């Protein structure tokens, strides 16, 4: 059992998938699971509790960045050596977790990003294009190149999680997290993961309008950092 690892799952209206995600984690030996119910209007929190997860509830939807912030802070209270984040829609395979965690366990990295673009088989071309654009924007704004800046599957050493500051609330957190890695001079490694794309998980992706909104928020985040 991976008792030294805490898994954080931000979740918004994920009653269709959350129970299965938690069950699959437990089969893999990951029993310490925190679900941040980010103002869901369905039974996400109820279903997560039934599966034995610790559920933290936002009364209103704060966005994935807000949920990550709540989850990472709570995970540190469990005194883990490693904190893992993954999405609640079932697109991440728990079988990839050993490979994700290994560089941190071996002391080779402080943060590991599970990159879908290192193993893009089955990834819709529209998602590949969107991710490539996001990677370029992240690099242009923050000067740090990664292959999958938008991946929600990540592993952090305890020390790294303690140093990272989260100020964003929405999807821009994925890119701003890269900026935090650079700011703190944390050792980053990317490892290949596979993504499980279903009609349901694809429906949870960003629209073009949301993507533009995220871009504007990233520009504002860059401006805030420039004035510090």
Image (spheres, rainbow, N blue to C red):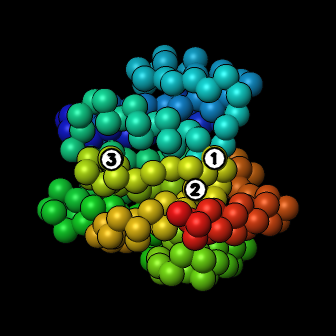
Could you tell me which residue is drawn at 31 percent across and 30 percent down? 77
Q: Residue at x 40, y 53 (%)?
A: 164
Secondary structure of residue under mark 3: helix
Residue 162 has which mark?
Answer: 3
Left or right of 103 on screen, residue 132? right
Alpha carbon separation for disc pair 2 and 3: 16 Å
Give the labeled residue for mark 1.
169
Q: Marks 1 and 3: CB-CB under 8 Å?
A: no
Q: Position of residue 59 (x, y in %)?
A: 67, 22
State which tag comes first along the sequence, 1 or 3.
3
Q: Which residue is mark 2?
A: 173
Please rate how many residues cluster around mark 3, counting C-alpha atoms within 10 Å: few if below 14, some from 14 to 19, many from 20: few
Whether tag 2 and tag 1 are in contact, CB under 8 A, the answer is: yes
Give the camera-side residue of 72 and 95: 72
In the rendering, at what x and y percent does residue 22 appear? 45, 33
Q: Which quarter of the rendered picture does the N terminus lie within?
A: top left
Which sits earlier in the primary sequence, circle 2 or circle 3?
3
- Res 218 seen here: no
Answer yes or no: is residue 43 visible: yes
Q: Assign a secondary structure to mark 2.
A: helix
Local SS, label 1: loop
């Amino acid at each position: 059992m991976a008792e030294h690892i805490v898994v954080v799952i931000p979740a918004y209206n994920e009653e269709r998938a959350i129970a299965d995600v938690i069950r699959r984690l437990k089969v893999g030996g990951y029993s310490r699971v925190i679900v941040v119910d980010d103002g869901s209007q369905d039974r996400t929190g109820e279903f997560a509790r039934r599966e034995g997860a610790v559920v933290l509830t936002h009364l209103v939807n704060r966005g994935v960045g807000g949920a990550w912030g709540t989850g990472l802070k709570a995970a540190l209270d469990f005194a883990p050596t490693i904190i893992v984040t993954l999405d609640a829609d079932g697109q991440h395979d728990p079988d990839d977790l050993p490979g994700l965690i290994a560089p941190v366990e071996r002391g080779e990295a402080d943060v590991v990003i599970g990159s879908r673009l290192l193993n893009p088989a089955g990834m819709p071309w529209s998602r590949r294009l969107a991710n490539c654009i996001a990677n370029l924007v992240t690099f242009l704004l923050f000067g740090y190149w990664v292959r999958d800046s938008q991946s929600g599957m990540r592993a952090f050493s305890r020390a790294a999680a303690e140093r990272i500051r989260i100020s964003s609330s929405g999807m821009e957190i994925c890119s701003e997290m890269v900026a935090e890695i650079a700011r703190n001079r944390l050792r980053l490694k990317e490892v290949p993961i596979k993504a499980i794309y279903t009609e349901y998980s694809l429906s949870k992706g960003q629209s073009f309008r949301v993507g533009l909104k995220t871009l504007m928020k990233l520009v504002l985040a860059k401006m805030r950092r420039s004035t510090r």
